Structures are given as structure tokens and as C-alpha cells.
Image (tube, rainbow, N blue to C red):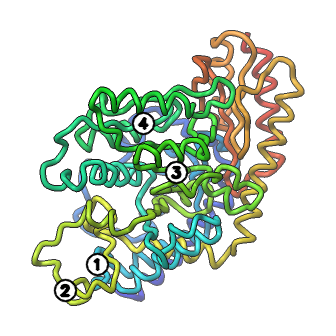
């Protein structure tokens, strides 16, 4: 493909994406196709001769788009938001076009330095503690997801807990990771990958109302483990849990970790974006105790997947835990000690120029534009919660500090399961569920930039009508 051919094909692809965004609200949120439909529509082998971009776009319309769940749909209320935006797509396009491999400063100086500055910009916008800035002992890096951030935090915690022995001899003691019963499953996976096994994770009970970790239970678990010869290595506190957006109490958890010299990682994958608004920073109280922190701009901050912002308070400790330097990667810049090599801040060696899309988003919207987006989502969720609260057939199951509302029909699980299936079958909206205190609970998460009051009201109308038939 010549530059001119790329130019013409690129125009056509951008037009296709723009048309998709303009019409996504008219599509069913979820695919109406049966499993295997897309695969059956594809040829059994790659074409022998090249095809024009028009043919590829025609098959996008015919085969691919109908087989999608449309995460950018204004009626998509499932899971957590995972929304992109025009600036993010353009930044990704530039990144793909440059094809930079940013594993070392030397392999892409601007790739590294732009990322460092973008993470400092974000830290300032969220008012994170100064210890997370690159101007001090810490700094930030883009991981692919909060799951990877948790894995890195786990490895650094093991390095610290073992006094550096982990690098040389591996897991030679019984270590323990602590998280609440509401914490994300990635914590267990990270422990398993790190060689701790499922037994290496101790889940801490939560407050029955707030669904947040009990500091007293955490302290008791750590002290019991120490008495049994187990080494407490890591506490993962969550700001905005997956099921209900509960907020673990950092002001109480932090001193416990400090007292017992346990690494504290704070997972704010979804809710961290809200801290760009000063009035929504309540979840960050006590963050000064954290050794690491992460949130996903690719969830609620209009930056396309994958983009997790991960900070550490001690960058040297992180590098000590993860660095491996073969001869073929040695270079003058690295040897000087004056640059950051982000290969030492993550599990894989290679890395894309992901900071570009973050740069495009921050410059296009500005901090105030992103604040407006977050506030809009919070207001729409509050509007929906008011509808639930006013209907005595329903109950709110948990507080809704951000843009997720957890609710259910009063009574047994069966009607709630039927209600969810009926609402999603309309193709107009899509909700997901969880279990709270063992009860089947519906989740409505607002976040898509195209979602308006009209879409939230339509969701409530569909839910209200389906409720009458769910019993």
C-alpha cells in the first residue's frame, strides 16, 4: 500500500467509523445472531489475491457489525463503561502509523517522555499525592489493564516482603495477599501467576451496608498470619468495587499496612476517573499511605482500550524487582541512568505508543471537558436511582457514589432474573447483574458519551414495564 493508497483507504475507513457512531443508537445493543453466524459467513481461507478496501468495509457492514455488542451505544449500561472518543481514535491511528516500539528510551525517546509527562498531567488532574509524580521518587506508566497493574504490584510486594530474595530464589516462603470479598478476580489471578496459589489470597469480610473492607478484620487476619509464620506481603484496597462501587476505607487500612510494613496497592480501575472532579475525590482520602495506585482511563475517561494508568511511590523498588538487562538491550542512555526504560515497569518487554491517545484526549477535551463528562454520568445515574427509589416494587441494594446503580425487585431472585432477560431482549438497552449478599442484583452503569436523559428514562420505562410481567 503506497502512501497515496493509504490516504484514500484511510478516508474511507474514517468515514465508516463516523457513520457507525452516527447510527449506533439505531442498532440493537447486542447481537441478534446465533453463535457461529460470523464464522459461517467468512471464507474458509484467506484470499489468494488482494482486495480493495471497499470490499473489506462492505463485509464490516454485512458480517462484523451485526455480530457485535455495541459498547458505544447510548443504551449500553452493562459492566462498566469502556468508551472511546474521536480524539482517542485519532491518537491510536497516529500511534499505529508511527509503529514505535517504546521498550527503551533509546528505541523511542518521545514515546517515553510523553508518557512520563502524561502520567504527571493525570496525577495533577486527579490531585494524587506528590510521591506518585516523576519529579520525586515515584512516577507513572501506562499498563494495558488494571489486571496487569495488580500483577506488577504483586511482584513488587513480594520483592519487598522477601527483602529482595524473590528475585533470586523465587517464592521460598508462605506469603499472603489480602483483599475484600468484593475485590476484583484479577487479584487471585495475579497471586496464582506469581506462584502463591489460591491459598495465598485471604479475602477479608466487608461491612454489610457499605460493602467495604473491614479494617478490624484485616488487622486480625494479618496478625493471625504473622503468628502462624505467614508473611503478609500485599493488601489490595479497592476504590469502586466491581459489583457495587464500594470504597474501602483507606484512612483506616493505610495505617495497618504501615504498621505491619505491608505493600498497599489501591485499585481504582473504574472510579479513579471520577477524582478529576474535586467533589468526587472522597474515595482518595488516605491515598497517601498507598505504595501504588491505578485507574483505567479506558473505562470512564473517553480513552479507548487499552490504557491503565499505574503509579508507584518508589520507582527504584519497582525497577529492582522487574529489571532484566541482556547484552542486546544495553545502550548509552540506559547506562547513563538519566532516562526511564519502561520495559522495567511492566511484565512484557515491548510496548506501544499508548500515551498518544491520552495526549489527544487531554488536549481535545481539557480537564474541564472531562469533568463535564464525569458529572453528566453521575447525574444520570442519580436520575435513574430516583426512579427506583420512588417505585416500591424495587429497592436500591447499595449506595451509588458514582455512575453505577445496583437495584432489584423486592423478593426472590427468579423475578429479577426474568426481568433482566426481558429488558435485554428488547435490544434497546443492555444491563448486567451481580450478587450482593447472595441476592441476584441488576446493575445499570452510565458512561457512554452519547447517553442522555432520554436513554436513561427509556431504560427505566422498559424495566418498569418488564417488572409487571416478571412475577
1 vs 4, front mark: 4
Would you place residue 412 above or below residue 306 in this image?
above
Residue at image coords 60%, 19%: 437
User: Within the image, what quadrant is residue 142 found in?
Assistant: bottom left
Please identify, in this view, whether the residue under mark 2 or under mark 4 is nearer the observer: 4
What distance separates the C-alpha of mark 2 from that of mark 1? 9 Å
Q: Secondary structure at mark 4?
A: strand
Residue indicated by mark 2: 331
Residue 313 sits in which quadrant? bottom left
Classify 130 as above or below 239: below
Label 3, label 2: how far apart the Cα atoms are: 46 Å
- Counting residues from the start of the chain, the first of labels 3 and 2 encountered is 3
Give me the C-alpha separation between circle 3 and circle 1: 38 Å
Q: Which residue is mark 4?
A: 178
The image quarter in which residue 36 lies: top left
N-terminal of the pair, mark 2 or mark 1, is: 1
- Asked whether, in this view, residue 233 is left or right of residue 440, the answer is left
Counting from the top left corner in percent of width and height, residue 309 is at: 49, 62
Whether 50 is drawn above or below 135: the answer is above
* Camera-side residue of 300 and 53: 300
Where does residue 162 sit, x and y in percent of width and height? 24, 49
Which residue position holds label 1?
Answer: 104
Q: Secondary structure at mark 2?
A: loop
Residue depicted at x 53% and y 47% = 254
Which residue is pictured at 57% across the width and 76% down the height?
Answer: 360
Q: Which mark is residue 34?
A: none
Identify the disc placed on residue 65: 3
Q: CA distance from mark 1 to mark 4?
A: 33 Å
Please tell me which residue lies in front, 434 or 471.
434
**Exactly how many numbered labels are in the figure?**
4
Q: Nearer the viewer, mark 3 or mark 1?
A: 1
CB within 8 Å, label 4 to label 3: no
Amino acid at each position: 500500500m503506497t502512501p497515496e493508497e493509504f490516504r484514500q483507504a484511510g478516508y474511507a475507513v474514517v468515514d465508516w467509523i463516523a457513520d457507525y457512531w452516527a447510527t449506533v443508537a439505531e442498532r440493537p445493543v447486542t447481537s441478534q445472531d446465533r453463535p457461529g453466524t460470523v464464522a459461517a459467513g467468512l471464507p474458509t481461507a484467506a484470499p489468494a489475491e488482494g482486495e480493495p478496501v471497499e470490499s473489506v468495509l462492505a463485509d464490516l457492514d454485512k458480517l462484523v457489525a451485526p455480530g457485535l455488542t455495541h459498547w458505544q451505544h447510548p443504551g449500553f449500561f452493562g459492566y462498566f463503561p469502556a468508551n472511546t472518543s474521536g480524539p482517542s481514535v485519532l491518537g491510536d491511528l497516529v500511534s499505529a502509523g508511527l509503529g514505535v516500539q517504546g521498550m527503551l528510551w533509546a528505541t523511542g525517546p518521545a514515546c517515553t517522555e510523553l508518557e512520563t509527562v502524561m502520567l504527571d498531567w493525570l496525577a495533577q488532574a486527579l490531585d494524587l499525592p506528590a510521591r506518585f509524580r516523576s519529579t520525586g521518587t515515584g512516577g507513572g506508566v501506562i499498563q494495558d489493564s488494571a489486571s496487569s497493574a495488580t500483577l506488577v504490584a504483586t511482584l513488587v510486594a513480594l520483592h519487598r516482603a522477601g527483602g529482595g530474595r524473590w528475585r533470586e530464589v523465587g517464592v521460598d516462603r508462605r506469603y499472603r495477599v489480602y483483599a475484600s470479598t468484593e475485590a476484583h478476580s484479577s487479584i487471585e489471578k495475579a497471586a496464582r501467576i506469581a506462584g502463591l496459589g489460591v491459598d495465598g489470597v485471604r479475602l477479608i469480610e466487608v461491612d454489610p451496608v457499605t460493602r467495604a473492607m473491614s479494617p478490624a478484620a484485616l488487622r486480625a487476619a494479618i496478625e493471625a498470619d504473622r503468628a502462624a509464620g505467614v508473611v503478609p506481603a500485599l493488601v489490595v484496597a479497592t476504590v469502586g468495587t466491581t459489583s457495587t462501587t464500594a470504597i474501602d476505607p483507606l484512612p483506616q487500612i493505610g495505617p495497618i499496612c504501615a504498621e505491619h510494613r505491608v505493600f498497599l496497592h489501591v485499585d481504582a480501575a473504574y472510579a479513579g476517573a471520577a477524582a478529576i472532579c474535586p467533589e468526587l475525590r472522597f474515595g482518595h482520602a488516605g491515598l497517601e499511605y498507598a505504595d501504588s495506585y491505578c485507574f483505567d482511563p479506558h473505562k470512564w475517561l473517553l480513552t479507548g482500550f487499552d490504557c491503565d494508568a499505574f503509579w508507584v511511590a518508589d520507582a527504584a523498588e519497582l525497577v529492582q524487582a522487574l529489571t532484566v538487562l541482556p547484552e542486546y538491550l544495553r545502550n548509552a542512555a540506559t547506562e547513563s541512568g538519566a532516562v526511564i526504560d519502561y520495559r522495567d515497569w511492566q511484565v512484557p518487554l515491548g510496548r506501544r505508543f499508548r500515551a498518544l491517545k491520552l495526549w489527544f484526549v487531554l488536549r481535545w477535551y481539557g480537564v474541564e471537558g472531562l469533568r463535564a463528562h464525569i458529572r453528566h454520568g453521575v447525574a444520570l445515574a442519580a436520575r435513574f436511582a430516583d426512579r427506583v427509589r420512588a417505585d416500591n416494587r424495587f429497592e436500591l441494594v447499595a449506595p451509588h457514589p458514582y455512575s453505577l446503580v445496583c437495584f432489584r425487585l423486592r423478593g426472590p431472585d427468579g423475578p429479577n432474573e426474568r426481568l433482566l432477560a426481558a429488558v435485554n431482549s428488547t435490544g434497546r438497552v443492555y444491563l448486567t447483574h451481580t450478587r450482593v449478599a447472595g441476592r441476584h442484583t441488576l446493575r445499570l452503569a452510565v458512561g457512554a458519551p452519547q447517553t442522555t436523559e432520554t436513554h436513561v428514562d427509556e431504560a427505566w420505562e422498559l424495566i418498569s414495564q418488564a417488572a409487571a410481567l416478571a412475577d
